[in-house]
Image: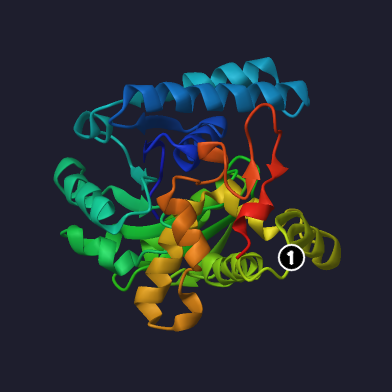
Amino acid sequence: MKKIKNIAVIGAGTMGNGIAHTFAQNGYKVQLIDISEDSLKRGMGTIEKNLDRMVAKEKITESDKKNTLSNINTNTDVKSGVRDVHLVVEAATENETLKLKIFKDLNEFCSKETILATNTSSISITKIATAVENPERVIGMHFMNPVPIMKLVEVIKGYNTSSDVLKTIFSLSEAIGKVPVEVNDYPGFVANRILMPMINEAIETLYNGVAGVYEIDTVMKLGMAHPMGPLQLADFIGLDVCLSILNVMYDGFKNPKYAPCPLLVNMVTAGKLGVKSGEGFYDYSENKKAETISKQFQK
């Protein structure tokens, strides 16, 4: 089983900075890589803010915070960023073409011994591994958001993934305080295969005028003991991400139950992506403080 010490994380967005934070807090040396310097600055700002919150809650000390930040270096160049790492975790946008391009580059830039993981939430690990000469080292490592808090890691073994790589990633996940669960390589895996149809059905319920945003979310929170309603959760995930995952499952299974609701498609087209854009099923602008804006959604 391979020993992991140095890790590269590609993508400084919500998932990438959370993954980098988690590894660094557990003593691993991390290269956080993004082509945008601004994205890296925002990502590091988010990490520092989250660490400050943990210090305030007395979950970590100020010294822990400093050590975590010192374990992270940022880089805008993939080639130099992945030169001496034992593991790369790709956490770029949920786009198959982009991921294949990244893995093609990793195949060229990384040591042939480097394990290549993807944080994809729905795309085939076996398909991503076609960009690599030795696909036995490619694996899915699907973290949940927010990464520093959520315990689950879906570990997805592609058709060619070696058992040694699987064991290494299981051991690593446990070392950073996560609970790894092995999942087979099918569209959406387990988490999103179950979650996204529920979110899509909630959007259909809104679209058909059965109830409003607040009412739908309240039923699911109080009636089903969900910590967050499905429409609020969709805003939190990003409506563009939800649409992308549903499209992957619809294309993969050719089953109409995975077809995205027209309302979701229209909202993404209009740039209403949820928390990240300031508006989705709720209004996240400063003066609204996440009020519902449900009336405009009904038919």
- Residue 29 visible from this viewpoint: yes
- Residue 186 visible from this viewpoint: no
Q: Nearer the viewer, residue 96 or 218?
A: 218
- In this rendering, position of residue 185 left or right of residue 216: left
Tag 1: amino acid: Ala
Q: Position of residue 21 (x, y in %)?
A: 53, 33
Q: Nearer the viewer, residue 38 or 278?
A: 278
Residue at x 45%, y 60% (from the top left corner): 265
The image's colour scheme reads rainbow
| Figure quadrant of the N terminus | bottom left
Residue at x 39%, y 28% (from the top left corner): 39
Q: Position of residue 158 (x, y in %)?
A: 34, 69
| Figure quadrant of the C terminus | bottom right
- In this rendering, position of residue 239 left or right of residue 35: right
Residue at x 69%, y 39% (from the top left corner): 290
- 151 up-or-down from 61: above or below: below
Q: Return the residue found at the far right.
A: 222
Q: Nearer the viewer, residue 183 or 91?
A: 91
- In this rendering, position of residue 88 left or right of residue 226: left
- 262 up-or-down from 240: above or below: below
Residue at x 42%, y 72% (from the top left corner): 249
Mark 1 element type: loop
Rendering quarter of residue 108:
top left
- 258 up-or-down from 288: above or below: below
Q: Position of residue 57 (x, y in %)?
A: 78, 26
Q: Nearer the viewer, residue 55 or 225?
A: 225
The residue to which callout 1 is attached is 211
